[in-house]
Amino acid sequence: MAMHYRVIPVTHYQQNCSLVWCDHTQHAALIDPGGDVEVLLAAVEAEGVRLEKILLTHGHLDHVGGAAQIAQLLNIPVVGPHQDETFWFQLLSKQAQMFGFGQTEEFVPDQWLDEGDVVSVGECQFEVLRCPGHTPGHVVFFNREARQAFVGDVLFHGSVGRSDFPMGDHDQLISSIKDKLLPLGDDVRFVPGHGPESSFGAERTGNPFLR
């Protein structure tokens, strides 16, 4: 049994939506389907997997904009992030106006997540780490067996997430990275919310924000 994934950039923000699946059961999830619903559903069909849930790292529109539509079409649950993101979901229509997206209706995830929770996709398990700073209820999904993390907008190749949004906190963000992510191991690779993939080891030694 192994986890596989495919990164599908969506929206004009080129947000990295990840299609993850279990090769034993062919059950799959979309992490942060920010938009371009037709593109994402075509990718699911192309891989021949069965989408069973949507996972969200945080409530910014470029990460959640397609979630409600896909969930309704396929009758699947939306899982995550942490409940402290509630206000971002309540502001989805205002976010859409602010960032130049089409009309987006507010919705509430079917399940909130917290530190220590485990989310299953088929037989693959993802540990949930709460990593506030970019937003207050941001979570990260970590598959220990594959040594792979999906970190949303906490950490990037050579950079870190913004903290100038409402309830953002730069010191808290850096603590999340240093206390929660880097201890998982230098060998752990991660998919960020935008841009190229990297590893925690590469960022620990080369990221100027972490020195």
Image: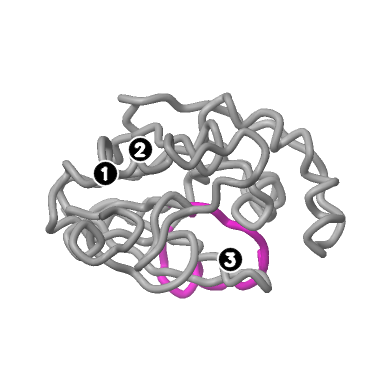
Q: Amino acid at mark 3?
A: Leu
For label 1, the residue is: 181
Instruction: Say which of marks 3 and 1 sits in front.
Output: 1
For label 2, the residue is: 176
156 or 118: nearer the viewer: 156
Q: Is residue 80 visible?
A: no
Contact between labelled residues 2 and 1, with CB atoms less than 8 Å apart: yes
26 or 181: nearer the viewer: 181
Q: Secondary structure at mark 2?
A: helix
Contact between labelled residues 1 and 3, with CB atoms less than 8 Å apart: no
Q: Quadrant of the C terminus?
A: bottom left
* Residue at horizontal 46 percent and vertical 27 percent from the top: 113
- Using residue 123 as the reference point, say whether residue 28 is left or right of it: right
Q: Is residue 101 above or below residue 53?
A: below
For label 3, the residue is: 41
39 or 169: nearer the viewer: 169
Q: Amino acid at mark 2?
A: Ser
Magenta residues?
Answer: 29-49
Q: Is residue 28 magenta?
A: no
Query: Crowding near pointer 3: few (<14 within 10 Å), some, many (20+)?
Result: some
Dot 1 or dot 2, earlier in sequence: 2
* Residue at horizontal 17 percent and vertical 44 percent from the top: 184
- Residue 194 at x, y percent in the picture: 49, 66
Total marks shown come to: 3
Q: Which of the 4 image quadrants contains residue 3?
A: bottom left
Contact between labelled residues 3 and 2, with CB atoms less than 8 Å apart: no
Q: CA distance from mark 3 to mark 1?
A: 30 Å
- Residue 142 at x, y percent in the picture: 28, 45
Q: CA distance from mark 2 to mark 3?
A: 33 Å
